[in-house]
Image: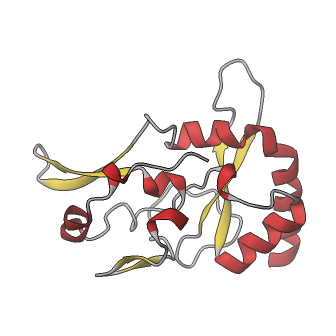
Amino acid sequence: MEKISSKYINTELCTECGGRCCKQCGGIFAPEQFEDLSVEGLVKTIIENNYSIDWWEGSPVPDEERMRTIYIRTRNVDQPIIDPSWAGTACTLFIPGKGCRLSFEKRPLECQCVVPDWDKDTGEYTCIISTEDRADKKQLSIRWLPHQDVLEEVADKLWEYEE
């Protein structure tokens, strides 16, 4: 996977913001961030690292029939492994006053590409996800499309694990 530019790192602004994006929802990984994309490898990684299975409703690409497009993200606080969340709960890796538990390189691609910004209209901080690096929810869902059969099996195993 290509290395993400440090242009997105603005620790001063992130500290001042207080982790607004991190308090909304866990970030989405790109498949290239995983060494082992086998069913067993992903199940183990998800359980050991407190990640979740989530999905895009339908297909992120036009003219494709699909009920959902599964991807992997960091888990939200007090939420299950299978969590089709629309946000609202903080990421489990967020430490108030300190930021993310993960180094920049280990963070989900979506989190690596967050650009903190001050919204003059609302007078609040907001986070913009770079589309330039194909790291927004739609583009990351598209990256996971070739892995849907494996992710369906992973989801089945994780349903059994949680029971």
Is 59 on the left-hand or right-hand side of 38?
A: left
At 28% from the left edge and 81% from the top edge, which residue is drawn? 97
Residue 57 visible to an observer of this rendering: no
Residue 154, percent from left and from top: 84, 60
Picture layout, residue 102 above or below residue 124: below
- Residue at 78% across, 26% down: 65
Q: Quadrant of residue 18?
A: bottom left
Q: In which quarter of the image is residue 143?
A: top right
Residue 124 seen in render: yes
Query: Residue 20: horizontal and vertical position, in percent?
Result: 31, 64
Q: Which of 162 and 60 is in front in this view?
A: 60
Relative placement, left or right, of 62 versus 153 is left
Give x and y (percent) for residue 55.
66, 49
Is residue 132 positioned above or below 27 on the image? above
Viewport quadrant of the C terminus: bottom right
In front of the other: 145 or 103: 103
Residue furthest to the top in view is 63
Colour scheme: secondary structure
Count of number-bearing discs:
0
List x then y, in percent, for residue 6: 36, 54
> Looking at this view, is 70 or 163 the one in front?
70
Is residue 137 found left or right of 22 in the rendered image? right
Q: In this view, does 4 lie to the left or right of 155?
A: left
Residue at the (54%, 66%) spot, across then down: 106
The residue that appears at 51% across and 50% down in the rendered structure is 3
